[in-house]
Image (cartoon, rainbow, N blue to C red):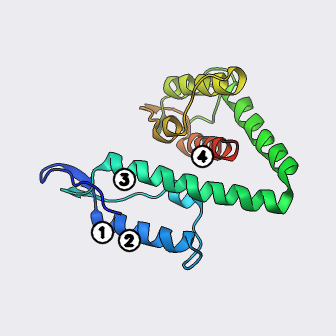
């Protein structure tokens, strides 16, 4: 797969790194290489270079690739545990996410220490409200929005690893029930 190149003075993803990852992913998907999970695809990152691949194009391709791996994982799990058990498991994870997102403002996640930066609580709380709206009221929220959400930094903010873990689980649930 080839992507458009950013201008010579514009930052893009390192083409060699992208091509190497996509080759590895293709082999894994065909069952010929090392196993690869949708989680690994979701968390891949690439160095940037001037004149590299256009970031938005690569990101879109990576999202489609993650979807393909997640579809396969879902189908494999359903084959092992059955559709009813799969649905029960997906609902349980969704409920855990909803319970966390519905907590009181400023108390949804553990806060960092006094002199440590974390995610801005107002930003995370506002996004958590969108998550509640998605689960309780069917309000629109796409996987791309979840994958691409960004939060400002704040002293005594929310612990980044906890917020990131919830976002990863949210994407997994959204992929599981699509």
Q: Are marks 4 and 1 in contact (CB under 8 Å)?
A: no
- Tell me the residue that label 4 is attached to: 168
Disc nearer the start of the sequence (3/2) = 2
User: What is the number of the mark on residue 141?
Assistant: none
**Residue located at (77% from left, 34% from top):** 95
- Tell me the residue that label 2 is attached to: 20
The reply, left or right, for residue 149 in relation to residue 98 is left
The reply, left or right, for residue 132 in relation to residue 159 is right
* 113 versus 63 height, above or below: above
Asked if residue 100 can be seen in this view, the reply is yes
Disc nearer the start of the sequence (1/3) = 1
- Tell me the residue that label 1 is attached to: 16
Farthest bottom residue in view: 32
- Tell me the residue that label 3 is attached to: 58
Q: Are marks 1 and 2 in contact (CB under 8 Å)?
A: yes
Asked if residue 115 can be seen in this view, the reply is no
Q: Are marks 4 and 3 in contact (CB under 8 Å)?
A: no
The reply, left or right, for residue 101 in relation to residue 84 is left
Considering the numbered disc 2 on the image, is that residue within a helix, a strand or a loop?
helix
Q: Quadrant of residue 23?
A: bottom left
Considering the numbered disc 1 on the image, is that residue within a helix, a strand or a loop?
helix
């Amino acid at each position: 797969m080839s992507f458009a190149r950013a201008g010579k003075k514009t930052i893009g993803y390192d083409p060699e790194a992208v091509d190497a990852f996509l080759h590895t992913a293709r082999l894994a998907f065909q069952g010929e290489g090392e196993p690869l999970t949708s989680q690994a695809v979701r968390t891949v990152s690439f160095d940037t270079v001037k004149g590299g691949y256009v970031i938005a194009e690569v990101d879109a391709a990576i999202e489609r690739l993650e979807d393909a791996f997640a579809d396969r994982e879902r189908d494999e799990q359903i084959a092992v545990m059955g559709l009813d058990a799969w649905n029960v498991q997906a609902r349980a994870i969704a409920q855990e996410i909803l319970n966390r997102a519905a907590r009181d403002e400023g108390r949804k996640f553990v806060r960092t220490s006094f002199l440590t930066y974390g995610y801005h609580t107002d930003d995370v709380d506002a996004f958590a409200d969108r998550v509640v709206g998605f689960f309780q009221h069917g309000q629109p929220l796409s996987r791309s929005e979840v994958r691409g959400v960004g939060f400002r930094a704040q002293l005594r903010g929310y612990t980044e690893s906890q917020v990131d873990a919830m976002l990863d689980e949210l994407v997994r649930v959204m992929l599981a029930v699509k």
